[in-house]
Image: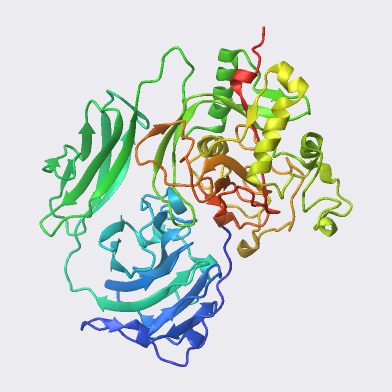
Amino acid sequence: MTTAAIEPEPANDKPLEKIGDGGPIDLLKLIDPKRDAVEGQWRMTDGKLVSPPAVPFARLQVPCDVPDEYSLTAVVECSSHRESFNLGLVVNGVQALLVIDGYGGGVSVFESQGLEGKWGTANDTVHVGCVLLDNAPNTIVCTVWKSGVRVTCNGLTIVEWAGESRSLGSLTYWNVPNSRQLFIGSYETSYQVSKLELASLPAKNPPPALRIAGFEPKSLEAGDSLVVAVEVSDPDGDQVTIEYRTDSKADWRAAEDRRVTIRDAKEGLLEVYVRARDGVGESAVRTLKFAVWPAWPARLPALAKVPFSAEAAKRHQTDWASHMKRQVVETNSIGMKLALIPPGKFVRFGHSDGKWATNHATRITKPFYLGVYEVTQKEYQAVMGKNPSFFSKAGGGNAKVRGIETRKLPVEMVSWTHAVEFCRRLSARSAEQAAGRVYRLPTEAEWEFACRAGTEKWFHFGDRCDGSEANLNATALKGSFLERTAKVGSYAPNPFGLFDMHGNVAEWCSDWIGDYPARPVSDPAGPDAGLGRVFRGGGWENAPAEVPVFGRWCFQDTASVAIHRNLGFRVVLAVEGVRARP
């Protein structure tokens, strides 16, 4: 995410409120929406502060000085939240951001354009899972010490962080002028704030803060032993005890040498609860969830276990191609290229307009071929005998592509039903039948694993996008916006050799939208029914924040006939339909 220069602090004709050692102060009484809004049209209705809908980075500064250590309580509600509610905190003189149910939903994270060098979902404060309730008041309590921050939402601890404030980085992209003041923000969703109270903390030492430093092995199979390393920060220097349990109702056990060891893991979902305790109090309980898989057959090439490097991605492809005596890239009778995607396992972050949000441990057990490119207008015309695209010579967006060879642009304005029919007709062509090739849409799990290509970051190319890495609308980040589709393959591929997995056009998957299973699963195909079919990856109209590798969307269309100029597809070729080399 790019940064922007902070403008000089504006003159404020009302003196800032000072917070003493008395009771909490009602910040809503200090706010004048017209004066204090930095972005968007905020308003006060029936004593509630209301943020504007459909405004990215809407924000309002609170005219109040902040003590060094304080408690901030907010009560917020929303009829149907699509994106995040944000609080700008001041931690030991440094401005930092609390994002709740942001980044497309399903993540709560305390971040400040880099926390200890890790941004967004990569830093250690991430709490996976939506926490805000729709059509109900949500109570958020932020407790800020000089040495750290704890945040609860509806009684659930979603953030516990301790460290040096300089590790919080910079918040310049929010352009909030006074870094010594609090601010409220929202992203494309209108929230009502019915309570906003600030109080100084009494002079006493905070409880210890607990951090998960790492664990081994990175991928568990039945019979393995799990070792979790923890770190604690305790400013008062008291003796700290680390405790753990694997059942929420079991007694706590003391860990040795700040390491939690679980032996002989059983297949399924393993939950580990860890806390730190001293003479003052105890830290929040950290809950860790691990998928424990059946042992992988030794006769097969290794699973591609995310995370893995770009070099490892290529090696997995060649190992499996050699094992099956097939090519890494296959070309069919109409010139489509398809790349071999190896079996592997990874963890999906749940997201779908803020409604479904769970971590989902997933294993892909069968290799498959996936289109190197999105299906082009030329390919769709060859198979279906027509071209419905908006950005075509005969389409409604022809002015945007005048003088451009449109046959290599991705096809769009294609419904899920049309995409499935394309696969059926392509499979039925005589040359494809003779070769034994059968096509289908990818499952959601297949699509995400192929898109990630080993990464745990937001995009297959990193944690930020300014429009140079993918055809997206990056204007909010001072980046580029093409305002149309681009020729397939115009941007760099991911390590599996797939182009345009982010942007250009969003891509249909075979699944219905729905909850991810809570337990580890292999080769999931989604629920039997749902509100609509899933599409992934985002298109040229979408902002980068809307299209991370874990982002998922659907139209509420059970007939599966919805179309959009931002939406196309790519196809899967089953390995069974690819003949082995002699």
Query: In the rendered image of this protein, does residue 383 appear above or below residue 434?
Result: below
Residue 78 location in percent, x, y? 42, 69
The quadrant of the rendering that contains the C terminus is top right
Residue at (58% x, 14% y) in the render: 324
Residue 144 occupies quadrant: bottom left
Query: In the rendered image of this protein, does residue 427 appear above or below residue 63?
Result: above
Query: Residue 479: in sight, yes or no?
Result: yes
Residue 158 location in percent, x, y? 32, 57
Query: In the rendered image of this protein, does residue 493 appear above or below residue 344?
Result: below
Q: On the rendered structure, is 21 left or right of 192? A: left
Report the front residue among 544 and 477.
544
Please name the colour scheme applied to the rendered image: rainbow
Report the front residue among 274 and 440.
440
Residue at (14% x, 45% y) in the render: 249
Report the front residue among 223 and 314.
223
Residue 332 occupies quadrant: top right
